[in-house]
Image (tube, rainbow, N blue to C red):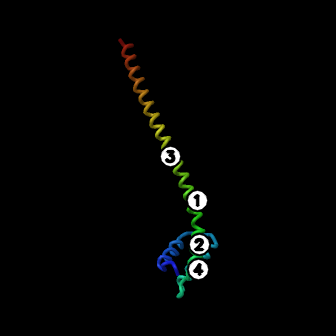
Amino acid sequence: MSADPSDLSLLVEEIGRFHIRDRAMLRAQRDMTRTIASAAGPDAATVARYLDAVDHYFAGFEREARSHLGDIDQRLAKAAQLQFNLTAERGVTAKRIEITQGVLTRARELARR
């Protein structure tokens, strides 16, 4: 066997905690669990088949997650830009209020005289 037995056992155990519904992956998982438990243990070809099944099953999830992460990053960038723009707009508006209040205060003071 080319894979370290304890590393392989840990991987099989970790994958066993996933809720897997794919029949091929379930079969590969079940077969590898039985093979590890047997006295002979898995040979190199059995390990290679199992690792291929793992790669085939989990690679799709990784691609999907990376795509989703990219989408989230784009949405966060848009939200950050929107927040930046709104903060700048708020600053301009607050300054406009300050200036117009000054004008109104002076005009009202003049009107009272």
Residue 83 lies, in percent from the top left, at 47, 41
In the image, farthest residue toward the bottom? 39
Q: Which residue sits at x=58%, y=80%? A: 46
Q: Which residue sits at x=61%, y=72%? A: 25
Q: Earlier in the sequence, mark 2 or mark 3?
A: 2
**Is 108 on the left or on the right of 78, as rendered?**
left
**Is 14 on the left or on the right of 23, as rendered?**
left
Marking on residue 52: 2
Q: Earlier in the sequence, mark 3 or mark 1?
A: 1
Alpha carbon separation for disc pair 1 and 4: 29 Å
Residue that mark 1 sits on: 64
Residue that mark 3 sits on: 77
Are the residues tagged 1 and 4 within 8 Å (C-beta)? no
Tag 1, which secondary structure?
helix
Residue 81 lies, in percent from the top left, at 49, 42
Q: Amino acid at mark 3?
A: Ala
Alpha carbon separation for disc pair 2 and 3: 37 Å
Are the residues tagged 2 and 1 within 8 Å (C-beta)? no
Residue 12 lies, in percent from the top left, at 52, 75
Marking on residue 45: 4
In the image, farthest residue toward the top? 113
Q: Amino acid at mark 4?
A: Ala
Task: Please name whichever residue, 20 or 104, is drawn nearer the observer in this view of the structure.
Answer: 20
Tag 4, which secondary structure?
helix
